[in-house]
Image: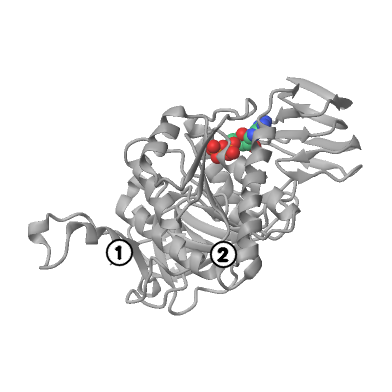
Amino acid sequence: MSEDHGKDYTLEGDSELRFEIEQKDAKVLVSLVNGFAELFGTELVKKKKYEFGLGAKVAIYTFQGCVLHVSGKMDVCYISKETPMVQYVNCHAALEQFRAEAEEKDRRGPVAMVVGPMDVGKSTLCRILLNYAVRVGRRPLYADLDVGQGAIAISGNVATILIERPASVEDGFPKTAPLVYHFGHKSPSGNSVLYNAVVSKMAEVTLQSMNNNKRTKSSGIIINTCGWVKGSGYAHLLHAAQAYGACAIFVLDQERLYNELLRDVPKGVNVVLLPKSGGVVERSKELRHESRDQRIKEYFYGNARTPFYPFSFEVKFQDLRLYKIGAPPLPDSCMPIGMKAEDNKTKVVAVTPTPALIHHVLALSFAESVEDDVIGTNIAGFCCVTEVDMERQAVMLLSPQPRPLPPNALLLWSELQFMDNHT
Ligand code: ADP
């Protein structure tokens, strides 16, 4: 652990300054004194002070060399000359060739998937590729299929956003106007049939929507995926690649996965093995849980720079239209004629409120009734059950919206829980 109240770090070309902050209330300020530098693809503005807090794991990279001024308490801080950034830039350059060609011929641009085990820097590589794309004037889509972390919405959901400007150094990409489909579990294994159905729907809708905007059409999609890459996890990756018609798959850090994909994807798909950055730190199960929790907390309460003030209100059981996607499995012999046991996995079933509902996150669907295509209907937002009062037959909900729920609001149960102990 080191405390420094201001120190200049001189970086040579093709190197990066890495630091981690793990102490509560710690604050690190970084500014670019000289040269050019970027954080995961976003250029730093000279002399501007960037602030980082608890949980930050940061790498500031420079192609040409730079001087950075850093102050504050950090747990680790060092300069590394071993970075895979040049390979990542080459991936961007290859995607650019596809985009230029697509633009010329008014075709759909490249759909690239980033795959690999947990904690290899998949989300970071997506961020870098998206930032480079917008910096050269593209407007790509970012699809996040990683229901474990939920970089765009919160975990338990699959989401897509249009990237129109580079990510903010401190806060990442703005999460405005996302297309969010509810899944309800932290891992695709929670309901494999539903996961594939949600991914297929997302792929179908986004590919279709690309035709409406010429620039986005040729810019393509960058897809982030789950870190579950074995067995059924692998089957999910293949399914996503097929649903999106991926033309490139970037495999981070796993030769086995790379070889499996080479064997299984159609010939025209470019499968590229890339090293992970030595800076990516493995997270324990607890840390992963904490960062999931942190995302939900930020959804309701914002962060220190942009705090939000959520509302609490009561909803009577009789007004609560609560559903869950996926009914318990029945043997085929018990199913009505023409239905398979699999169909149950995507069935929308009513949930009766019980005390077990406490702390669960609920998704508010834009669907008006269960007769609608609930799986393929956008999510308007989330609320969290903070109290279940069986005597009064009511629940208390934490919600970013001030008004009580719209009269026909359809809520979808998720296995995610959030303890609202915000003070
Ligand atoms: P994955 O998506 O594979 O789980 P992430 O991209 O989320 O992995 O990376 C895990 C963590 O490592 C993130 O907190 C990220 O900020 C950090 N990280 C990524 N690249 C670097 C790097 N070069 N140096 C230091 N930390 C990094």
Gap between marks 1 and 2 measured at Cα:
49 Å
Q: Residue sitting at 77 percent across and 29 percent down?
A: 14
259 versus 313 height, above or below: above
Q: Residue sitting at 67 percent across and 60 percent down?
A: 139
Image quadrant assignment for residue 333? bottom left
- Residue 142 is at least partly visible in this image: yes
Residue 352 - label: 1
Q: Earlier in the sequence, mark 1 or mark 2?
A: 2
* SS class, disc 1: loop
Residue 222 - label: none
Image quadrant assignment for residue 39? top right
- Residue 306 is at least partly visible in this image: no
Image quadrant assignment for residue 261? top left
Indicate which label's residue lies in the foreground, 1 or 2: 2
- Ligand 1 falls in quadrant: top right
Q: Residue sitting at 66 percent across and 57 percent down?
A: 100
The residue lying toward the viewer, choosing from 146 and 275, is 275
Q: Is mark 1 within 8 Å of ligand 1?
A: no
Residue identifier under label 2? 107
Q: Taking 168 as reference, is 186 left or right?
A: left
Find residue 227 and report its horizontal and vertical position in percent. 46, 38
* SS class, disc 2: loop
Q: Residue furthest top?
A: 1
Q: Residue sitting at 74 percent across and 46 percent down?
A: 170
